[in-house]
Amino acid sequence: MNWARERRLQRLVERATWPERREERRRLVLRFRAAMGRWVRDALRQLGVDAPSATSLHWAYEAVAELDALGEPTWALPESFDWLDTDTTRRVEYYRRNTAETPDFSNESLPVVFAWCIARLDPDGTRLTARRPAPPAHWRE
């Protein structure tokens, strides 16, 4: 088979499987949203903050309700937060440095409240977040 025919066949397969892949991606996002919301809710309770004041938790509750309707399980977040992306890590470091800074729970997004909770529960960065080594120089190019 020549490469042009193979490529056309591959595009047809990709188009045919796109709805399933899109649905799986949506479910993945819902699971992550639900897991983050559960963690934030528990962290706010530990910190003595009224969890219902964080309106961004409604976003997570909606994800849980949708997963329940689909019969899908929810996740728990891994406790060593070495998987955090650079934006979230920067937010956590910001809240560690600015200890007087508290987000407006009624208006802030769930990732911002999540970063604040990590910074408050682990102010020195030794319990929850493992420091990642810097990536090799050729990765940064």
Image: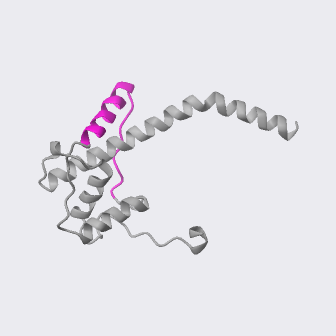
Return the residue nearer the eye: 127 or 97.
97
Where does the C terminus fall, quadrant-wise? Answer: bottom right
In the rendered structure, does residue 69 fall within the stretch colored magenta? yes
Residue drawn at 20 percent across, 52 percent down: 104
Q: In this view, does 102 lie to the left or right of 28?
A: left
Horizontal placement of 38 versus 2: left or right?
A: left
Q: Where is residue 1 in the image (x, y as percent from the top left)?
A: 88, 36
Residue name at image x 32 percent, y 52 percent: 111
Q: In this view, does 35 lie above or below 18?
A: below
Colouring scheme, one of rainbow, by chain, secondary structure, one colour: one colour
Residue 15 painted magenta: no
Quarter-of-image position of residue 124 = bottom left
Q: Position of residue 78 (x, y in %)?
A: 36, 53
Residue 45 rendering spot, x and y as whole percentages: 15, 50
Is most of the magenta stretch helix, strand or loop? helix
The structure residue drawn at horizontal position 20% and vertical position 46%, both measured from the top left corner, is 106
Highlighted range, magenta: 57-79
In-front residue for pair 77/40: 40
Q: Give the left or right position of residue 26, taking residue 104 as reference.
A: right
Frontmost residue, 65 versus 96: 96
Q: In this view, does 91 lie to the left or right of 23?
A: left
> How many numbered circles are shown?
0
Question: Among all residues in the image, which is located at the extreme right?
Answer: 2
Q: In this view, does 77 lie above or below 123?
A: above
- In the rendered view, tell whether residue 127 sits above or below residue 8: below
Indicate the position of residue 3 as horizontal and vertical percent values. 84, 41
